[in-house]
Amino acid sequence: MTRYTPAEIEARWQAAWSRDEVFKAVRSADKPKYYVLEMFPYPSGRIHMGHVRNYTMGDVIARYKLSTGHNVLHPMGWDAFGMPAENAAMAIGGHPKDWTYDNISDMRAQMKPLGLSIDWSREFATCDVAYYGQQQALFLDFLEAGLVYRKNAVVNWDPVDMTVLANEQVEQGRGWRSGALVERRELTQWFFKISDHSEELLEALDRLVNWPAKVRLMQENWIGKSRGLQFAFSTIDAPDGHDRIEVYTTRPDTLLGASFVGISPDHPLAKVLERDREDVAAFCAECRKGGTTEEAIETAEKLGFDTGIRVRHPFDTSHELPVYIANFILMDYGTGAIFGCPAHDQRDFEFATKYGLPIIATYLPSEDSDETLTEAYVPAKTEKVFYNRGFAGEPHQTGLEGIDAAIDFCEANGIGQGVTKYRLRDWGLSRQRYWGCPIPVVHCEACGVVPEKKENLPIELPYDVDLSVPGNPLDRHPTWRDTACPSCGKPARRETDTMDTFVDSSWYFARFTAPHADTPTVMEDAAYWMNVDQYIGGIEHAILHLLYSRFFARAMRITGHLPQGTEEPFDALFTQGMVTHEIYQTRDDKGRPVYHLPEDVTDGKLADGTEVEIIPSAKMSKSKKNVVDPINIISAYGADTARWFVLSDSPPERDVEWTASGAEAAFKHLTRVWNLCDRIGAMDKSAQGTGDAELLRAMHVCIHDVTMGIESFGFNAAIAKLYAFTATLQKSKAGYTAQREAIMTLAQLMSPMTPHLAEDIWAHQGGEGLITTAPWPKADEAMLVSDTVTLPIQVNGKRRAEITVPADMPKEEVEKAALADQAVLRTLDGAAPKKVIVVPGRIVNVVV
RNA sequence: GCGGGCGUGAUGGAAUGGUAGACAUAUCAGACUUAAAAUCUGAAGGGCGUACGCCCGUGUGGGUUCGAGUCCCACCGCCCGCACCA
C-alpha cells in the first residue's frame, strides 16, 4: 500500500500541465469560448486565505468549463499601483517600485503551488510601463471624445503635513500621521463624465440577469434617479447676482411646509458672503473641518448659520423664509440648496428644533390626526395620507400622487419645472501621489492645458524620487516636470497628478484579451474573448469598481477600443464571502489586548499553559493575528486540502470560518479517497461482486448533483454529495469493473476542486491522457429516477406518517393510500377530512 | 446618518413555499490495540415517556398560506459600502 503524498503528487502534475500548456488560451473557432476572471489581487506581499478561496472558486469554474469542451481564458495579473507601496517606502525605506515587484514575485511563487489553471503567459501588472502607457493612450482618446474634463473638487487637507489625505488616512477627523484636524480644500482636478451615462448605466442593470440582485439594487440606489421640482426662491437683501436661489426638491408636495432655505457652505452665495463677512467666514471655516466622506458629513452635528437674507415663498410672496448656511448640504447634489420641511424630514426636524424654526405639517395620517408633531412624519411614498396643506391633487392621496400633482401644478403656474436628477457624481481621477499612472497632459503658459502627443507616450514615472517627506514627490522632482509644450513647443510643465487606481482596474479585463499589444486592445482578440463570462470577487466592490468598469467599457467602445456588445463587460457576477478565524487574546499587565497566532494556541492554551480568551470569528487580519498562512497549510497538507476546505464548509457567497480541525478533516478525507483508489487498483480485475447496479445508480445521482452544484455555485453542497458518494463506494461490495468506473468518476467530479489528487487517481486507474482535459461525465437520466417514492403525510400541517408508493401513482390513489394509513386514521380519530392536498412526489397534507 | 445584506443544534452549515438540522467539525459509546494515536462502526436539537408516541423548536413579535427557515410588516443584533483603501 502506498501513501498519499501531496507534495510529490502536486509538483508532478503541475509540471505535466505546464509541459502540455493545457491552460494556454488560444483563439479558436472550433470551441465555444469561456472567459472566467477573478478580481486581480493587490500585491501586498503575501497571499492569504481570501485569495485562496477566490482563486479556487474561479479555478473550479475554469476547470469545469475546460472539461465541458470550452476554450477557456483564465488569466491573472496584479493591481499594482496604490498607497501601500508609498507607505512602505516611507515606513521602511526602499522604493515603491522595488517593493511592488518584489511582492509580485513573492506572491506569484506562493500562488503557483495552488495549481490554478491560469494562462500565466498573459500575466501583467498595472504598474508595468507597457500597461500604464496604454492607459495614458486611452485617457487621451477619452479626452478627445469629451469624456474627461477639469473642475474644482474638495479634498482632505492635512495642514501640518501640508499634504492631501485619502479618506482612509483620516481618523476621527484627524490626519493619521500628524494628528492635525483635517480641513477640506479645493483643488482643480480631472473628472470622467460618468454622470452623462447615468440613465444608461441604470437602465442596463435590468439586463444583468446573472448578477446578484443585491448588487444591482445597490448600483441602482447609488445612481439614485429621482424626479423632483427645480424652482427658484426670490431673495430679499442678497448680494448682487443672487436675486434668486435655485433649489431642487423631491418632495414638492411639502412646499407649504417650508420653514427655511438651506445652502451648502460651498454654495456660490455662501462664498460671496464669506468674502465680506467675518462671521460667515468663521462659520464656513468651521463647516470645512472634518473629512470629506458622506458618512462624516451625515453623522456630524447639524450646524446652521442664519445669513439674515430672506426669500419669498413662491405661493405667497408676503411669506418670508430665512436663509441658513448648513453643514449637511452637499454642493455636489442637486443645486447645493434646499428648502427645509421639518414636519416631513427628520434631519430638518432636528435642525428646526435647534434653531427655533416653525414645524408645519402638510399631510397627516388622517383627517383627525393631531398636527403637533414630536418627530418628523415620514410615511412611505406609496402610503395614502391626508393633505391638510395640500395644493394639488386630492386631499387623500399617496405621496407619489401628491408629488406628481404638485409638479403639474407648479409647472402650470410658472413655478419651476419637473426635472430628473441622479445622485451619481462625476468620477474624480486625480491623485496627488507618486505611485500611479501619470496623467499625460502638459501645462503651458501660452496654450493652457495641452494633451501630450501619443508618440510621446508612455510618460514614465521617474525612479529617483524622495518619499521621506509628505506630499507628491513628482511636484518636487528637479527635472521631471520640465518638458516642451506639445502645441507650441515652448518650455512647459507636466501634470504631476497621477490617476486613481480604480482607473487601472477598470479595463484590465479587456487588456487580458491582448496583454502584450502595443495598442490598449486588439479588436479581433477583444471581439473573440469578451465578455467576461463569469466574474468573481468580493462584495466590497459591488458599487465603485463594477460601476467604473461598466462606464469604461462604454467609453472604450465610444473611442473604438472595444467592439459593440461589450458595454456590459461582465455577463455573470458572483460575490464571494470572506475567510474568517477566531481571535486569540490575552492581556498585558496594563490590561491591553495581546493577540496570538492560531499556530501558537492549542486547546485554548499557549505553550506555557496560559489560557487565551477566544473572540468569535472575524475577517482575517494581521493586526488581530487571526491569520492562517496558506503556505503553511500547503506544506502541511498540500494545495488540494486547502482548496477542498475553503470550498467545503460554507456557501461561497458567505464567510467561511477557517478551523484547524476542518483543514485536518479535509486532509483525512482526501487520504481516504486515495486509499480507496489504492484498494480498488489492487483488486482482482476479474472480481465479481454484488450491488453493481446500486453503486452505478448512486454514481449517476452524484454526477447529476455535483454538476448542478458547480453550475449554481453550490460548491459546499457539491462537496457534501461527494462525501456521501465516497462513503457509498467505500462500503460497496460491487465488482472490479463497477468500482473502477466509480472511483474514476469520483476523481473526475473532484477534479475541479482537487485537481492533483484527481490526476493521480486517473493515472493510477489507467485513465487515458489527463483528467484535466478528459470530457466531463454525463449523468444517465434513466439511472436517476427510482420506481417508488416515500411521501410524508401531514395532518393539519404536522407530519404524522409516511407511505411508500409507486412513483407514478395517480393523485386519487395516493390520497386513498394516505387516508388508509394506520397512523393517519389514529390521528384523525374519526374526524372527516375537509380537504386533502397531494403534491406529487413531495407531500400529502390532510386538512380537518 | 443613508444604502445593501445576514441571523437555523455545541460549531460551520443543508433544505424549487412541502418530512428542519443533509454533509462536516466537536462530543459520547463500541470495535481494533498492552496502551495511545490512526482507522472502522454507531448515537446524538430540547423536553416528557418503558414503548407506540406526544409537546416545543430556524433572532423577537405579528401576518399571508392547506403548509413558512423560506413570502410580507415591525423590532433587535451583527456585517458590508458611502465616491481619495484596494
Image: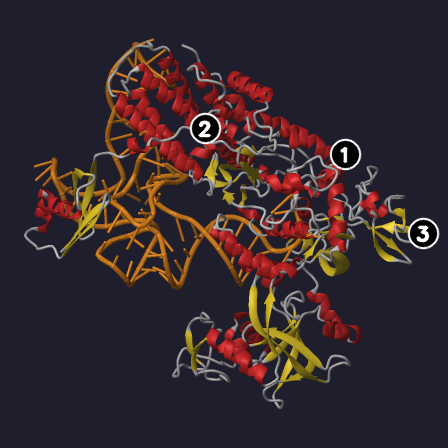
Mark 2 Cα within 10 Å, few/some/many (few <14, many 20+)?
many
Measure how far apart labels 2 and 3 are at the Cα level.
Answer: 66 Å
Please give the residue where the numbered disc 1 appears in the rendered image.
A94
Mark 3 Cα within 10 Å, few/some/many (few <14, many 20+)?
some
* Residue at 47% over, 41% down: A655
Measured along the vertical axis of the image, is residue A35 above or below residue B38?
Answer: below
Whether labels 2 and 1 belong to a single chain: the reply is yes
* Residue at 59% over, 89% down: A316
> Element under label 1?
loop
Residue A777 seen in the current view:
yes
Report the side of A42 relative to A772 (left or right): right
Q: Amino acid at mark 3?
A: Lys
Whether labels 1 and 3 belong to a single chain: the reply is yes
Measured along the vertical axis of the image, is residue A663 above or below residue A346?
Answer: above
Q: Quadrant of the C terminus of chain A?
A: bottom left
Please give the residue where the numbered disc 3 appears in the rendered image.
A490
Q: Disc 2 is attached to a residue of which chain?
A: A
Q: Amino acid at mark 2?
A: Ala
Label of residue A663 in the image = 2
Residue A589 seen in the current view:
no
